[in-house]
Each structure stands twice: as structure tokens, then as C-alpha cells.
């Protein structure tokens, strides 16, 4: 127990963490170029925020939230997603009072009490973006273009952008009615959760993972059949923008997404790699969410991708990562008297920007060389009695095995400029 982590969580250890840093660096670079600024919100929020924001009839709220009462009797939930929290922060910090739209991004852990399997965890990490204060097909296309650019820059192949429109409060009653008409006669054959959602939110039934329910729902009326004129035009314009940007997409009328706040554009990105878990990210427009949380009529759109799934997919597609941390130089202490000289040289090199290290465990010369090899050091610098006397350092190129003695103030010439 003491040495095992909770189910559905992961340690990201050295060797792995460099891959995360690489992915995050690309994400931050793309965000910067598209004008998105980082936002950091708390990892826990008032439970009510997610109930209202994500929706009472969603799997997330019904089954997956980590909710607890804190010592002050407050009802708290570890964030299962970022959108509701970002909207809360946008309202609380009055970001609506500045120039609009506000383009934000976040990277951080999310928590869902899901059944753990490859690509599905209880603590996982999302990169997400939210654009608040703009309703135009251009920004929808931009958000999707940016998502696709992140994947492409990460080297992922076999990507598919699936898009749909989920309409607006105008079109929903018509859809609701058509769905109830279609599902009503066979309602008793659906799972208990779907039966429960039939009155409250029949659209959710289309997102049920139960195979029998999916079969029963095959051929159900689609949202696209029910779109009002305004939504149909908007969806058409979003597609036109995507075409103009040269972004391929598939219209997927069955795409409803697992959160209740979506209106208009909804999308998901599929990638070859982790089979059933192949959705590597998704998002959409949520024009009613700001109103639901803060009674302001402000439109929004965003998406999020799961970093674990991205990493798994990259590994399965054999994408190459930059090498993990390796010292430019490892300084070997070949006699006890050399210790202080080694420490001073180490400090000097680090101060100049070199990645440098030494042994702290009293290893023998041979063991220190072995250790330098394990760390993948480019060079080893040996300082022993002779070198101390001569004011020199013996440098070994760890790749070629070549050795040469240089004056101790000339080490950086061998290492190359910084
Ligand atoms: P979501 O589809 O629930 O959307 O999650 C986005 C991504 O997070 C998924 O596509 C998946 O890659 C990853 N993910 C979800 N659950 C897990 C899990 N248990 N383990 C590992 N990865 C997971 C949202 O969360 C919305 N907030 C996205 C959004 C932003 N929509 C508008 N703005």
C-alpha cells in the first residue's frame, strides 16, 4: 500500500518527463503564435460549478467526479475538466471587461473516476484552449486548425477531424421531440441510465457506451435534420472556413460529445494508435455556458486533448523524441585532494550554462567512468594528482574514446561554445 500509487494514476519519472516537456514546449509555442495566453486555475472548485457547467445528466457528473466535503463543510470537487473552471475565472476576474475575445490555454491534471485502461486514467492531464467573447465561424475554424497544428507538429499521423453541429436552444426542442418519438417505443430495452435520461436529456442517450443502447439508437434522427436556419448557415460557414484553410474533416452526425454545454460546432480528433480510445481530443462551442454560470450572454468555444493519449499515440506511431537529459560533461575525481578543484570547475561550467555533474558517493575511478557512461555524458573530465599539479584536466570524448590533456581554463574550448 505504502509503495503503490492509487489506481488510475501515474508517476512521470525522469526519462519519461522529458517527453512531456517536449510535448508541452510545442504546445506552448503553437499557443503563443495563435495569441493564446496561459491561465492557471485551482485543481478543486465548488462542486456546483461542474454540476451546472458540465451537466447533471452527464457521465462525468453522475458517476465520475471526485467529490468530498472539506473541513469547513464545503462541497468540493477535483476538476474533471477545464472549461467550467476557466469560464468561472473569466467571470470572477472580469476578463470580459477587456478587449474580446479572450484566448486562453491551460495544461494540467484533471480527475475522473473512470475505469482505468490504456489511455484512460483517474488522474490525467489535459491541454485545453478556451476562446471567450467571439461567435464567428472563423474562430471555430481557428480553434480546429490550431488543434490540428499541435498534432501535426507533434508528428502524429492518420489524424481525422470529425465535426458536427449540436444546434442551439432554438433547434433543441425539435430534436428532443424527434428523439423521444424514435426512442419511446423501445425505451424498456435501453439501459437504466438511458431510461432515466429519456425525459431529462434524450440527446445524452446517443452518447451511451453500452453496445445494446448504441444498436437501439442506430438510425435515430440527427441534429443536422433539426437545425434552425441560423445554425445551418453557421455550420455551413464553419465548413467553408475549414476548406479554405485546407483542413480535411468528416461530418459525423452521431457526434454528441460527453458534456452538456455544447451548442453549434462540436468536434473530435481521431488518431490511429490506441484502438477504441482513439479520440485524442475534442471540443466545441458553448454559447450558453457563461450565462449558466454567471448570467452573462457571452459565447465561447474551446477544446482539450489528453496528454497521456497523445504520448501513447506518439509512442505507438514510433514518433522520435529528443534525447532525454544528458550531461555535457561529467567530472571524475581521481584523487581525494582533487575534490575542491572538481567542485569549483563544476560550479564554473554550470554557471556558463553547461550541463555538468560529478560523483557524490565515493566511487572508484573506474566506477565513476561507468557512471558517466550511464548518464550518457558527452565528455568525462578526469582530475587526479597529476592534473592538480599541472593545472590541467584529462578530457575523454565518451563517444570516440579519444583522450587529451588540456589546461583547466581551456575545458570549454573542447566542449564548444555556450
Ligand atoms: P473531453 O472530451 O471530456 O472534453 O476530454 C478531452 C480529452 O481529454 C479527451 O479527448 C481525452 O483525450 C482526454 N481524456 C478524457 N478523459 C480521460 C481519461 N479518463 N484519461 C485520459 N484522458 C482522458 C473536455 O474535457 C472539454 N472540457 C473540452 C473542451 C474545452 N470543450 C470546450 N472547451
Image (cartoon, grey):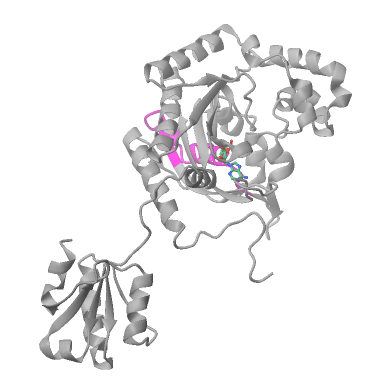
Asked if residue 383 is positioned above or below residue 305 in the image, the reply reads below
Residue nearer the viewer, 285 or 71 = 285
Asked if residue 349 is positioned above or below residue 214 in the image, the reply reads below
Residue at (65% x, 30% y) in the render: 260
Judge left or right: residue 168 versus residue 56. left
Residue nearer the viewer, 295 or 282 = 282
Query: Which quadrant is the N terminus positioned in?
Result: bottom right
Res. 174 image quadrant: top right
Q: Is residue 84 magenta?
A: yes
Residue at (56% x, 51% y) in the render: 43
Query: Which quadrant is the C terminus positioned in?
Result: bottom left
Judge left or right: residue 357 versus residue 290. left
Residue nearer the viewer, 56 or 141 = 141
Q: Quadrant of ligand 1?
A: top right
Residue at (40% x, 42% y) in the render: 27
Identify the residue at the far top of this view.
229
Q: Which residues are magenta?
A: 78-105
Evaluate whether residue 265 shows in this view. Answer: no
Residue at (24% x, 66% y) in the render: 354
Residue 29, how many percent across, how many down? 34, 42
Residue 53, how many percent across, how many down? 62, 35
Asked if residue 72 is positioned above or below residue 215 in the image, the reply reads below
Residue 194, how many percent across, how many down? 79, 29
> Disc count in the image?
0
Evaluate whether residue 320 shows in this view. Answer: yes
Amino acid at each position: 500500500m505504502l509503495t503503490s500509487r492509487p489506481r488510475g494514476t501515474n508517476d512521470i519519472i525522469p526519462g519519461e518527463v522529458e517527453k512531456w516537456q517536449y510535448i508541452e514546449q510545442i504546445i506552448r509555442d503553437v499557443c503563443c503564435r495563435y495569441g493564446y495566453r496561459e491561465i492557471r486555475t485551482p485543481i478543486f472548485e465548488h462542486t456546483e460549478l461542474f454540476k451546472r457547467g458540465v451537466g447533471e445528466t452527464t457521465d462525468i457528473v453522475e458517476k465520475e467526479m471526485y467529490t468530498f466535503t472539506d473541513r469547513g463543510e464545503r462541497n468540493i470537487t477535483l476538476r474533471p475538466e477545464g472549461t467550467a473552471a476557466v469560464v468561472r475565472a473569466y467571470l470572477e476576474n472580469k476578463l470580459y471587461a477587456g478587449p474580446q475575445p479572450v484566448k486562453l490555454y491551460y495544461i494540467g491534471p484533471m480527475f475522473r473516476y473512470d475505469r482505468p485502461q490504456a489511455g484512460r486514467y483517474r488522474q490525467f492531464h489535459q491541454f485545453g484552449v478556451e476562446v471567450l467573447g467571439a461567435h464567428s465561424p472563423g474562430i471555430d475554424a481557428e480553434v480546429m486548425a490550431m488543434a490540428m497544428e499541435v498534432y501535426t507538429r507533434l508528428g502524429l499521423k492518420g489524424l481525422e477531424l470529425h465535426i458536427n453541429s449540436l444546434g442551439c436552444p432554438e433547434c433543441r426542442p425539435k430534436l428532443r421531440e424527434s428523439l423521444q418519438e424514435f426512442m419511446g417505443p423501445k425505451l424498456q430495452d435501453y439501459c437504466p441510465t438511458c431510461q432515466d435520461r429519456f425525459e431529462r436529456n434524450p440527446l445524452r442517450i446517443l452518447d451511451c457506451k453500452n453496445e445494446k443502447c448504441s444498436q437501439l439508437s442506430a438510425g435515430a434522427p440527427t441534429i443536422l435534420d433539426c437545425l434552425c436556419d441560423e445554425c445551418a448557415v453557421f455550420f455551413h460557414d464553419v465548413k467553408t472556413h475549414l476548406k479554405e484553410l485546407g483542413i480535411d474533416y468528416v461530418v459525423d452526425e452521431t457526434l454528441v460529445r460527453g458534456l452538456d454545454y455544447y451548442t453549434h460546432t462540436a468536434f473530435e480528433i481521431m488518431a490511429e494508435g490506441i484502438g477504441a480510445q482513439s479520440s485524442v481530443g475534442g471540443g466545441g462551442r458553448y454559447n450558453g455556458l457563461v450565462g449558466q454560470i454567471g448570467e452573462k450572454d457571452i459565447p465561447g468555444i474551446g477544446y482539450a486533448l489528453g496528454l497521456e493519449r497523445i504520448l501513447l499515440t506518439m509512442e505507438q506511431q514510433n514518433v522520435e523524441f529528443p534525447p532525454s537529459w544528458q550531461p555535457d560533461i561529467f567530472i571524475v575525481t581521481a584523487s581525494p585532494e582533487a575534490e575542491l578543484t572538481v567542485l569549483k570547475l563544476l560550479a564554473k561550467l554550470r554557471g556558463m550554462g553547461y550541463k555538468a555533474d560529478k560523483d557524490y558517493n565515493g566511487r572508484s575511478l573506474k566506477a565513476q567512468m561507468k557512471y558517466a557512461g550511464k548518464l550518457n555524458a558527452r565528455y568525462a573530465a578526469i582530475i587526479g594528482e597529476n592534473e592538480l599539479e599541472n593545472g590541467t584536466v584529462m578530457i575523454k570524448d565518451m563517444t570516440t574514446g579519444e583522450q587529451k590533456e588540456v589546461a583547466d581554463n581551456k575545458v570549454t574550448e573542447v566542449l564548444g561554445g555556450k
